Image (cartoon, rainbow, N blue to C red):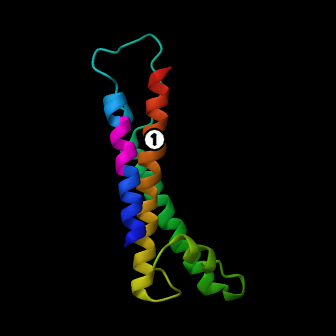
Amino acid sequence: MLVFLYFVVAAGLLFAVLRLTCGPCVMGYAEAGAETLFPRSRLPVITLGWTLSLFLTVTYVLCVGFDLIFPGYAMYEAWIALLPGVTWLSWSSFVLGLAWAFFYGWYIAFLFGGLFNAIAAQN
């Protein structure tokens, strides 16, 4: 729980600072009245969040399935190190791993997308 709280607080603080300095550009929205001949590159953070979260959850499910089919080549030890509280293998641990994978997708989207949009807005 403490690890989850750390990630939420760190992402929230950084995103709040970016939002205060850049405004709506952090989320990938254009500023009002900022029509230019060459529009700036933007990443839509919401779309990026859903894409990364679904990608990581599908990857997690495929890796668990691979580990069950080919136990001699199991990769679960790498997942366990990255997903706090996950053990091999129970239903509650599997669902917790799905939740962590989904959360990591949004975490990456908010930080990477927000940073990219804030830096792109400065150029």
Looking at the image, how many numbered discs can be counted on the residues? 1
Q: Is residue 52 left or right of residue 22?
A: right
Q: As drawn, which residue projects farthest toward the top? A: 37
Q: Position of residue 120 (x, y in %)?
A: 49, 27
As rendered, which of 14 and 81 lies closer to the eye? 14
Secondary element under disc 1, as helix, strand or loop, is helix
- State the residue at coordinates (31%, 33%): 20
- State the residue at coordinates (49%, 29%): 119
Residue occupied by mark 1: 113
Q: Splitting the image into 4 quarters, where does residue 77 fall? A: bottom right
Q: Position of residue 65 (x, y in %)?
A: 56, 80
Q: As drawn, which residue projects farthest toward the right? A: 72
Q: Position of residue 88 (x, y in %)?
A: 53, 87
Asked if 39 appears above or below 93 in the picture, the reply is above
- Which residue type does callout 1 highlight? Gly
Q: Is residue 37 within the magenta segment?
A: no
- State the residue at coordinates (49%, 35%): 116
Asked if 106 appears above or below 95 in the picture, the reply is above
Q: Position of residue 112 (x, y in %)?
A: 49, 44
Q: Main secondary structure of the magenta part?
A: helix
Region in magenta: 12-18
Please say whether residue 27 is visible from this viewpoint. no
Q: Splitting the image into 4 quarters, where does residue 100 fall? A: bottom left
Quarter of the picture containing the N terminus is: bottom left
As rendered, which of 77 and 3 lies closer to the eye? 3
Please say whether residue 73 is visible from this viewpoint. yes
Q: Splitting the image into 4 quarters, where does residue 4 fall? A: bottom left
